[in-house]
Amino acid sequence: MLKRVTLAVAVAATLCLIGPAAAQGFGYGPGYGMMMGGYGPGYGMMGGYGRGALVDTNNDGVISAEEAAASADGVFAAMDADEDGALTLDEYMAVRFGPQYGYNAQREAAMQAAKSARFTAMDTDKDGKVTQQEFIAAAKGHFDAADADKDGKVSPWEFRGRNWN
């Protein structure tokens, strides 16, 4: 049970590092923002309250490459249900990225298809599994793409610029 709780928290926080999540939010309350506060249940990349977790572990308002890498390691470990060092499509698809309540079946199907496509893109050797090295490489690529000024940190503006396009 602890592994599932860890998985849910870690995946929600790190999604921004491996691809857009587009989770369905609900209600008002602190959290859905990248920094702190905002609307929804708390799935912010850099803070967020509620059910969110921190990627910005030192709370300096930016995500460093080290913070991003550590978070990606944690997400991979939580997703690797059989702890064999590789993710299968089933392990990857079993994780839900944020609350999804079935309000929009068409959107949910599109999000599942996009998630499957992200798995395929990460599987660079096309063996049907994503190794930790492949997963980390994909997370690094997403981080590097978000780091527009190439200073080794992702600011809230860089994050939003990467994920809003």
Image (cartoon, rainbow, N blue to C red):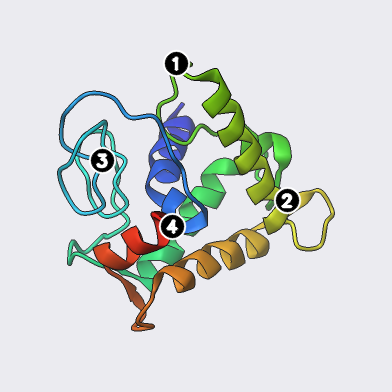
The quadrant where residue 70 appears? bottom left
Q: Is residue 66 above or below residue 9?
A: below
| 149 lies left or right of 106 | left
Q: Which residue is mark 4?
A: 165
CA distance separating discs 4 and 3: 18 Å
Residue 120 circle label: 2
Mark sitting earlier along the chain (4/1): 1
Percent of width and height locating residue 158 = 32, 67
Name the residue beneath numbered marker 3: 32
Question: Are discs 4 and 1 less than 8 Å apart at CB?
Answer: no
**Residue 74 image position (x, y, % from top left):** 47, 52
Q: Is residue 14 visible?
A: yes
Query: Under tag 4, what secondary structure?
Result: loop
Q: Residues within 10 Å of mark 1 (few under 14, many from 20)?
A: few
Name the mark on residue 103: 1
Please say whether residue 81 is visible from this viewpoint: no
Give the number of the mark in front: 4 or 2: 4
Q: Earlier in the sequence, mark 4 or mark 3?
A: 3
Measured along the vertical axis of the image, is residue 135 above or below residue 100? below
Please identify, in this view, whether the residue under mark 1 or under mark 2 is nearer the observer.
1
